[in-house]
Every structure is written in C-alpha cells, then in structure tokens.
Amino acid sequence: MDDKKDEEEDKPKKFTVEIVEGMAFTDAASAGAISAISGSIQQGFDTLRGTFNPNQNSIANSLHIDQNFDYLKKIADSMEKSVKLAEEQRDEAIRQRKEAVEDAKRERRNFYISLAVTIVLGVIALIVGIMAL
C-alpha cells in the first residue's frame, strides 16, 4: 500500500493555466503584483529544486517551468504596459473634454456678443430709417 502511495507521489502533477482575453485590472499595481508573485514562486521553486532526487529533477526539467515563469513575467509586463497606456488615454480624454467645455463656453460668449452687436446695429438702422423719412 505504501508502494502505491510512493508511486503516486513521484508522478508529475499537471496544472493548466488558462489566459483569458480581456482581463481587467484597476491599476498597474495589479499587474505588478502578478510579476512579484511569479518571481516569488520561481524563487521558492528554485530553492525546492535543490532537494529533488534525479527522477523528480528530470520531471521538473521536462515541464519547462523556468520558461513558464519567464512567460508569466512577460504577460505581467505586457499587462502593466496596457494599464499605463489605458491611464494615459483616460487622462487624454479628460483633457480633451475640458478643452471642449472651454470651447463651448467661448462659442456661447461669442454668440451672445454677436447677437448684441446685431441688435444694436438693427436699432441704429431703424433709427436712421425713421430719421430719413
């Protein structure tokens, strides 16, 4: 019975990680956290790797774990860049909105000035027309 248990412990366990498109993070800290966690797991795995027997070591090497950690770091870096780009785009949209509001205020002021000038000129034209009669 113990032999069966030992065999099960020596078998490699397969883990599947699914990357879902459109993952949303509220800030760059979330993407940075993934990178930090990945680095922490890698450091722990490297420490643990020193205790592996040759069979376990060959299994670990066949899983290409180092490449997977590098891949996770690349994903985290890419996500961090995406978050920064989104923040820049949001800031730009806010700036453009403020400019649009200022432009609208300026156009409204110009409209009222033009309307006042038109009314004054209309009154002057009416007075001149009455005087010419």
Image (cartoon, grey):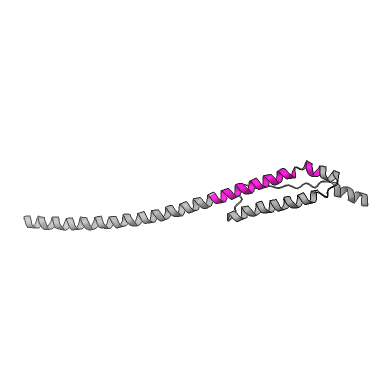
Residue 113: percent from the left, percent from the top?
Answer: 25, 57
Q: Which image quarter holds the C terminus?
A: bottom left
| The one of 50 and 94 positioned closer to us in this rendering | 50
| The one of 131 and 24 positioned closer to us in this rendering | 24
Q: Residue furthest left?
A: 133
| The one of 9 and 77 positioned closer to us in this rendering | 77
Vertical side of 130 occupied by 69: above or below: above
Q: Is residue 32 magenta?
A: no
Image point (91%, 49%), residue name: 4
Horizontal arrangement in the rendering, residue 37 relative to residue 86 (left or right): right
Image point (11%, 58%), residue name: 127
What secondary structure characterizes most of the magenta part? helix
Image point (21%, 56%), residue name: 117
| The one of 77 and 10 positioned closer to us in this rendering | 77
Highlighted range, magenta: 59-84
Residue 104: percent from the left, percent from the top?
Answer: 35, 55
Horizontal arrangement in the rendering, residue 100 relative to residue 45 (left or right): left
Horizontal arrangement in the rendering, residue 44 relative to residue 79 (left or right): right
Residue 57: percent from the left, percent from the top?
Answer: 82, 44
* Label tally: 0
Residue 35: percent from the left, percent from the top?
Answer: 66, 51
Image point (66%, 47%), residue name: 73
